[in-house]
Image (cartoon, rainbow, N blue to C red):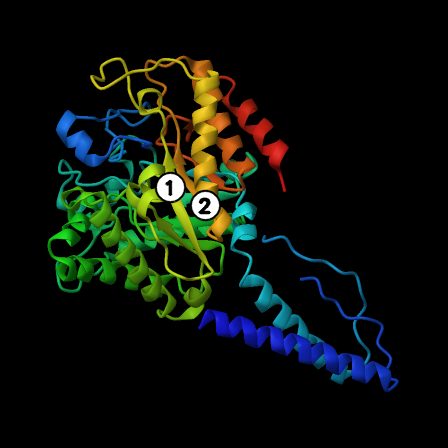
Amino acid sequence: MRQIKKMKNMICLFLAASLICCITACGIQNAGGDSGAASNVPTESDAAAGGVKASLPGTGGAERETMPTQPQTEQAASAQPQTGLVTSVQSQSETARQLSVTGQSAQAFVENLGVGWNLGNTLDPVDCTWLADNMEMEYETAWGNPKATKELIHYIKSEGFTTIRIPVTWKNHVDAAPAYTIHKQWLDRVQQVVDWCREEELYVILNIHHESSWLTNASKDYEQTMAQYRAIWTQLAARFQDYDEHLIFESMNEIGFDDLGDVKGCELQNRINAEFTELIRTSGGKNSDRYLLLAGYWTDIDKTCAGSVLPEDDRVILSVHYYSPASFAIADRSSSWGYQETWGTDADFAYLDGQMRKLKEHFADKGTPVIIGEFAATHTDKDAESVVRYTAAVMEYALRYHFCPIWWDNGQEIDRTALNYRLNGMQEAIHEVMNKYRR
């Protein structure tokens, strides 16, 4: 259907241009029209088997799961036409041009996202059993961070970030089956943070985050599991249906189906991503053309390149995460499965380049743009200069391959009260990369 639309748009463009030529030949004067226009990280099954967890600074002691956890605008200076007929024709021509371009602009759209930042460990805490039933809104601070503020969002924008990913966990904020109604106060709060981002003219990615405890049941009871999935996304699609393309929906976060094995598990995730895309596309409002971010298998680069197949849609984007090597990005000295204190050898850079090149060859070169939805390295037991070097390198290599890198921050990177960087040298390193690749 989208391909048919594009063909129609091109035909309209041709006819409109032909009519303009005919009008001009008949002597109608026209001064011109304005046509401006990981394995990346250990999987959850690995964590279950080996107790892999990473407690990152700034979380009040809470653990983060380790996988547990403008398109470029053509411009032409010209004056307004002098006749109503020409104005009408050119308006139709310009509309056709814009529609035909947007159908081909997913890669340009992603490049325009620039560098992003994650509002991590804020609206995504899960199963905070120490909170009483009447303390639902305290989930936002349950993992040690202060509540998000307009001042924080403004600071993130002032630092050169142009995209904010807002991870949100919904499972503790919905009614029981069959309605799975999202609690109004929680949804209102999420919308408030989204609106703050939009007031700063930032792109926003909204997802369902720590939902693996129920979403992975799709391998055993697909329809029952998808009833909850459909219910949540139907409500989100309705609430945000009038928001423009600056709001992106992300299908899921770090999900895999280890009980099925990688091949069958990946096929199941492909099925869910396809159903998610169809649900949003048919949900009304501006969702029919919204850019959608579809998670790769476990958001792991190797597993994703091996089996993830995205639906045929010219506004879908692939999401993967980068925490490689896990021995540096996640592990500390207590980790029994490996530990690396420093990063920055020729081999380290070669591996990073190879993973980015793999994404380019498997997806970007074939028309699917890529977002690195999370990347970071724990500060615990790490050489600080290596952490800065790693962060800047992942960001730069992603931009070099025309991907959008979104920095994971669970509170360890930016002090959300003092509004400054916690690690010496990090701000300067990030600004250097941003300035080098600024559009």
The quadrant where residue 328 appears: top left
Q: In this view of the protein, which residue sits in the foreground, 257 or 117?
A: 257
Above or below for 389 versus 40: above
Q: Is residue 215 left or right of residue 30?
A: left
**Residue 226, position in %: x, y?**
19, 59
**Can you identify the residue that label 2 sits on?**
370
Q: Secondary structure at mark 2?
A: strand
Which sits in the foreground, 296 or 415? Answer: 296
Would residue 429 be seen by someone viewing this image from the given angle?
Answer: yes
Q: Amino acid at mark 1?
A: Val
Residue behind mark 1: 320
Total count of labels: 2
- Tell me which residue sits at (56%, 36%) in the image: 400
Question: Tags 2 and 1 in contact by the CB under 8 Å rule?
Answer: yes
Mark 2 and mark 1: Cα distance apart in space = 8 Å
Q: Percent from the top left, x then y, of residue 250?
A: 36, 51
- For the C terminus, the image quarter is top right
- Residue at position x 33%, y 46% in the image: 296
Label 2 vs 1, first from the N-terminus: 1
Task: Tell me, for residue 83, which label it has, or none.
Answer: none
Residue located at (26% from left, 33% from top): 143
Residue 420 visible in the displayed image? no
Where residue 14 appears, x then y in whole percent?
A: 67, 76
